[in-house]
Amino acid sequence: MNTLKGTLVVLAVTLFFASCSSSVKITGEKPGTANTKGLKDYYKDFFPIGVAVAPRMLHGEDSALIVNQFNSLTAENAMKMGPLHPRENEYFWKDGDSIAFFAKKHGLRLRGHNLCWHAQAPNWMFKNANGDTVTKEVLLQRLKDHITTVVKHYKDYVYGWDVVNEAIDDRENVFYRPSAWYRICGEEFIAKAFEYAHAADPKAVLFYNDYNTENPKKREKIYQMVKKLKEAGIPIHGVGLQGHWSVNNPSREELEKSIKMFSSLGLQVQVTELDVSVYAGRQGGQLIQGQRRDSASAFTPEMEEQQREKYKMAFDVFRQYKGKLTGITFWNLSDRYSWLDGRGRKNYPLLFDTNRQPKKAYWDVVRFDAAK
Ligand code: G3I
């Protein structure tokens, strides 16, 4: 009896110290099965970890991986103006609702994406009955009606919205993107969009969302715009760094500078659309001017090592800015599908491979000393 008792004491002590270990225990089991730790568990003391989804992913193996690994969702397309509001007096709620119900059922947070964007905006929004361009007053009223209807519809599901997406131009000598919104309303549509969203749901966290936010010149323009909105008392609460990065950008320095600059305004910062293209390039590895299309479509060991370095750097920085960073969302679930595919080449931008298995970069992201 004493030997057994002694053994139990040793076992209890061992288990106690193992549970106190500050370094995260690596289970190593196959993610997607119920009892394995997921990204959300490794990062539960830092920030929610989300993923952009389509309705087709809410069943079968994709859904198991989503629930096991993530605690936040974004609708990749279903809640955008065009898919949601295809005709002036017609809303198509089914796809967005399926994602909202799935999030509620599984206790997942839900980011709303997005209320006002130059892309995927339905043509009817900008035309009157004669087919002519609408006036500023008509367009702002239509924007108000859309935002009010959508935000109220999802009020009990969505905690925060990407209110305006990509309003700043990439060209150095152009400030605002010359979208139909801007051409008809001037910059005022931006402030109005935030006011409409806040009136519809005063609790919602409201973000300005954009890409290439680590490019110094674009970042400065975004900073000036959101600073001006904040100083004017416009209800803006956060900036979304989309995070469509590649193996050669951004640098650690530029990433840290973006987080520090926007959080210095008292705004939340989130990475809202994270992926790391395995092809060098600007946003999402899109071809740099003159860069030839890469015919290779294999995920080479060199690509993997470069991608590992970028993901490791990024999550080292994310953890360092815990509190200023209030969420990290991946854009798409696994390398089975990425919005980056189809440019004449397959991309492999995510942490799960084409068989939904964790890549080496996944283990780089979850292996860290929480005490640092
Ligand atoms: O649903 C229709 C389908 O009925 C039709 O048969 C098919 C072929 O025309 O098109 C389908 O719609 C496509 C939609 O994705 C859903 O698959 C659109 O053509 C296609 O343009 C759309 O692409 C989306 C893109 O935004 C639109 O610009 C991507 O999936 C989506 O990942 C991407 O996401 C954006 C973020 O919202 C904002 N930040 C940049 C990011 C990447 O562009």
Image: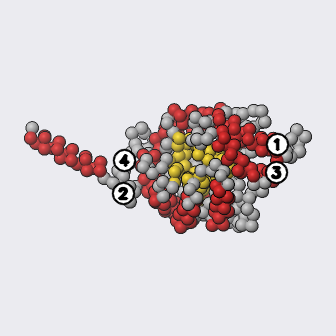
Q: Name the residue beneath numbered marker 4.
A: 27
| Label 3, label 4: how far apart the Cα atoms are | 55 Å
| Label 1, label 3: how far apart the Cα atoms are | 10 Å
Residue 138 has which mark? Answer: 1
Q: Amino acid at mark 1?
A: Val
Q: Mark 3 and 4 residues: CB-CB less than 8 Å, in contact?
A: no
Q: Note whether ligand 1 is within 8 Å of mark 2.
A: no
Q: Name the residue beneath numbered marker 3.
A: 184
Q: Mark 2 and 1 residues: CB-CB less than 8 Å, in contact?
A: no
Local SS, label 4: loop
Image x and y of residue 43, in percent: 44, 50
Horizontally, is 22 left or right of 244 in the view?
left
Local SS, label 1: helix
| Label 2, label 3: how far apart the Cα atoms are | 52 Å
Nearest to N terminus: mark 1 or mark 3 = 1
Which residue is at 71% across, 55% downward? 167
Q: Which mark is in front, 3 or 4?
A: 3
Which residue is at 51% across, 39% downward? 108
Q: Amino acid at mark 3?
A: Ile
Local SS, label 2: loop
Q: Which mark is in front, 2 or 1?
A: 1
Nearest to N terminus: mark 2 or mark 4 = 4
Which residue is at 74% across, 67% downward? 173
Q: Quadrant of residue 146?
A: top right
Nearest to N terminus: mark 2 or mark 1 = 1
Question: From this viewpoint, is residue 345 visible?
Answer: no
Local SS, label 3: helix
**Circle 3 Cα neighbour tier, 10 Å, few/some/many (<14 / 14–19 / ≥20):** many
Q: Which mark is in front, 2 or 4?
A: 2
